[in-house]
Image (tube, rainbow, N blue to C red):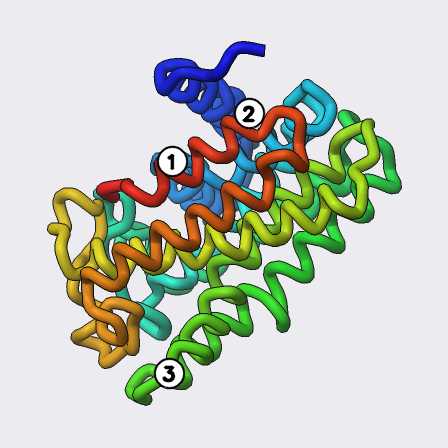
Amino acid sequence: MRERTQMDFEREYREAQALVEGELSGSFLEDGPHKELLDAMRYSLLAGGKRVRPVLTLKFCEALCGDMGPALDYACGIEMLHTYSLIHDDLPCMDDDNLRRGKPTCHVVYGEWLALLAGDALQAAAFERLAKSKRTIPVANSKACAVLAKAAGRTGMCAGQYLDIAEEERQLGAERLSQIHIWKTSALLEAACLMGLTASPVEPTAAQWAAAERYARELGLAFQIRDDVLDVESTAEELGKPTGSDAENGKRTFAALYGLEECSRLVEDHTKLAQESVAGTFENAEFLCRLAQMLAIRKN
């Protein structure tokens, strides 16, 4: 099999994105007295973004069985849940951000109470999409729901968000800071990878399951460290969201702990570990390795 070029990678990424965008664009179009709620859900869901998590779901499925199709509902579900988390993160009681992906945040456009409900409804819709999928078998849908629930809840995203806010002004060390982001960032990336394996009609080996977990953990840490660097180096126009807010809120970040030069080295280290975890474990891991590299050097 010939080695993929960068152009091949970019084409494959766009194809996976387009599959997800096509499905998401048909969501929540029904009419009724709750139409404004549906509009708020669609506003945030279709606001753009790289769609990293659904692409991971599709591509881990493909790496195992050669086909992205079985994972498409799962990919849509994880993007719905991710969007819910962004809406809630931006609320005044959380990070109080007014800009997301270059657009006013959901609560700025629709008001705080409606944004809260839109997030809640998207979270519920995510699990509904998984549970009702006809592209997979019922036992796989049940497993996917369990994987996503674990990543989103008390030992995942919510736990990470709790620590991120509760310990805002404390001088956290490397271990606690890593724990926050393993829960807050890596957990949902892990769910994306594992749901892709779960959707596949080919059963993953224990080694492949463990490799996906390691890949996501390292990818999440690299992603967050890069995010902290961009919050210092970039502009709101480039990022599509406010910069410098971490420092203003007294948050301990990797950039504050290590400095920008050391952070760049750490991003490279975690990216290499992510790539090594899947190389050789999956017959076709080149796309996953290139994806990790893309995220390591991203500008937004």
The residue carrying mark 1 is 50
Q: Position of residue 262 (x, y in %)?
A: 25, 63
Q: CA distance from mark 2 to mark 3?
A: 42 Å
Residue 8: which quarter of the image? top left
Tag 2 secondary structure? helix
- Tell me which amino acid carries mark 3: Gly
User: Which of pointers 1 and 2 lies earlier in the amino acid sequence?
Assistant: 2
Going by the image, does 202 lie left or right of 99? right
Question: 234 or 120: nearer the eye?
Answer: 234
Q: CA distance from mark 1 to mark 3?
A: 31 Å
Q: How far, Cα to Cα, is label 1 from label 2?
A: 15 Å
Mark 2 and mark 1 in contact (Cβ < 8 Å)? no
What element does badge 3 sit on? Answer: loop
Q: Position of residue 113 (x, y in %)?
A: 41, 63
Q: Residue at x 65, y 27 (%)?
A: 63
Amino acid on which the number 2 mark rests in the picture: Glu
* Quadrant where the image shows the N terminus: top right
Name the mark nearer the viewer: 1 or 2. 1
- Residue 173: numbered disc: 3
Q: Earlier in the sequence, mark 1 or mark 3?
A: 1
Residue in the image at 45% along x and 78% along y: 175
Residue corresponding to mark 2:
23
Q: Secondary structure at mark 1?
A: loop
Residue appearing at x 62%, y 59% in the figure: 151
* Residue 16: x %, y % from top left: 51, 23
Query: Which circle, 2 or 3, is nearer the viewer?
Result: 3
**Residue 122 visible, this angle:** no
Task: From this view, report whether residue 142 is shown above or below residue 3.
Answer: below
Label 1 vs label 3, nearer the camera: 3
Q: Residue 176 location, x and y as percent?
A: 45, 80
